Amino acid sequence: MYFTEEHESFRQSFKEFLQKEVTPYIDEWEKAGTIDRFIWKKFGEMGYFGINSPEEYGGMNLDLFYTVIFLEELQKINSGGFAAAMWAHVFLAMTHINKEGDDRIKTEYLAPSIDGEKIGCLCISEPFAGSDVSGIRTTAVKKGDAYIINGSKTFITNGVYSDYLVVAAKTNPDLGAKGISIFVMDRKTDGISATKLNKLGWKASDTGEIAFDNVVIPAENLMGEEGKGFPYIMQHFALERLVMAVNAHARAEFALEYAIQYMSERQAFGKSIDKFQALRHSVAEMASEIEVCKEFNYSVAKRLNDGEYVVKEASMAKLTATKMADEVIYNSLQLLGGYGYIEDYPLARLLRDSRLGPIGGGTSEILKEVIAKMVIDKKQYKPAT
């Protein structure tokens, strides 16, 4: 219903690419806390960073189900950090460059991002403003033909080693959400500093806290219209939340598949443990929950691909899928018994990595309130114009 033969061919080739080019290095990158630059270039050479970008900048402009496949297969190499570094580059930083950047900005940042020559990060969350985007304190003061940026950002994926930053800042603090604008800036610009954060999971990715101390950037690095930053961010949240929902059902599926394989080989009381009714029924429940979330996520992807504004549905997808993934991975680890707690098996890392699902891209608590406003208060969110 959703995937053609071309989609499945792409899935197979991408899966083989990951197994050959990425999997051998995962444990090394998890320990190092950083990903070697060569793999970004290989992703770029294969066209994986450009699957949903315009052809005129080197992309392929493919439908959203290629993105779904890209996300699903990244979850099955068991490194939430590596996957996050890739999709945050493509679907967070590059999305803003593509949608709000002018031709100069796209030529300077989007094209090399597609090639894997430049890595991007999206800087919205701050020490005192995470899910509350309107509460950001970073400022951008216009002075002649430049903006001066001051403030800080935190929990930024690719925040330490990226080449450019897409930054939300207040150009008019008195206007609250209506005073936010979006900028792009080079990492090497004077006044930018970054510190790597030590995380529970997502070890391979560099999550950073970034400080801006009188950073001067050209006025032409403003993306879109001044003061339109908040609706731009909200508009792209639907894609980010769908991304995290797809990630969730994919990692849950990977965890359960691993547990089922383990159960078929593990012997207890003279038979494999997949013959015990209590365990079989646990698997049946988990498989059902995964399938329900997956089907809903696919339907939301279809509607988003068709141009619908699916902020409610994407929020629901992330809320339910990330909760489901945590529960399924927790229970899958239990099926491995003591081995589930051993780092040599994949479930320990999966459990840690999955825990970010209900936090990143809008916490579950915030999503519940967003959904409640739409369901109870009949609030309508509209695209930026």
Image (spheres, grey):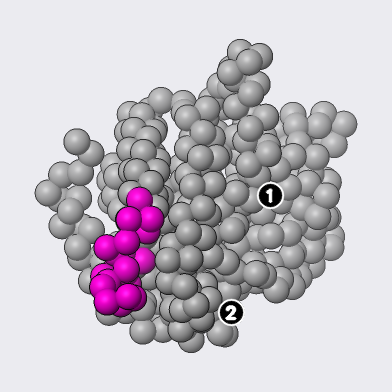
Q: Report the residue marked by disc 2.
A: 33
- Residue at the (40%, 76%) spot, across then down: 39
Residue 10 in the image: state x and y as whole percent. 21, 57
Q: Residues within 10 Å of mark 1 (few under 14, many from 20)?
A: many
Q: Name the residue carrying label 1.
A: 124
Q: Measured along the vertical axis of the image, is residue 173 above or below residue 202?
A: above
Residue drawn at 57 percent across, 66 percent down? 352
Q: What secondary structure is marked by label 1?
A: loop
**What mark, if any, has residue 147 been given in the picture?**
none
Q: Is residue 34 above or below residue 85?
A: below
Which residue sits furthest right? 174
Q: Amino acid at mark 1?
A: Ile
* Left or right side of 93 for 173: right
> Toward the viewer: 75 or 288?
288
Residue at the image point whose x is 26% and y is 67% from the top:
15
Residue span colored magenta: 259-281
Magenta stretch: dominant secondary structure = helix
On whether residue 295 falls in the magenta region, the answer is no
Residue 288 visible in the current orientation:
yes
Determine the secondary structure under disc 2. loop
Camera-side residue of 131 and 112: 131
**Residue 282 in the image: above or below residue 195:** above
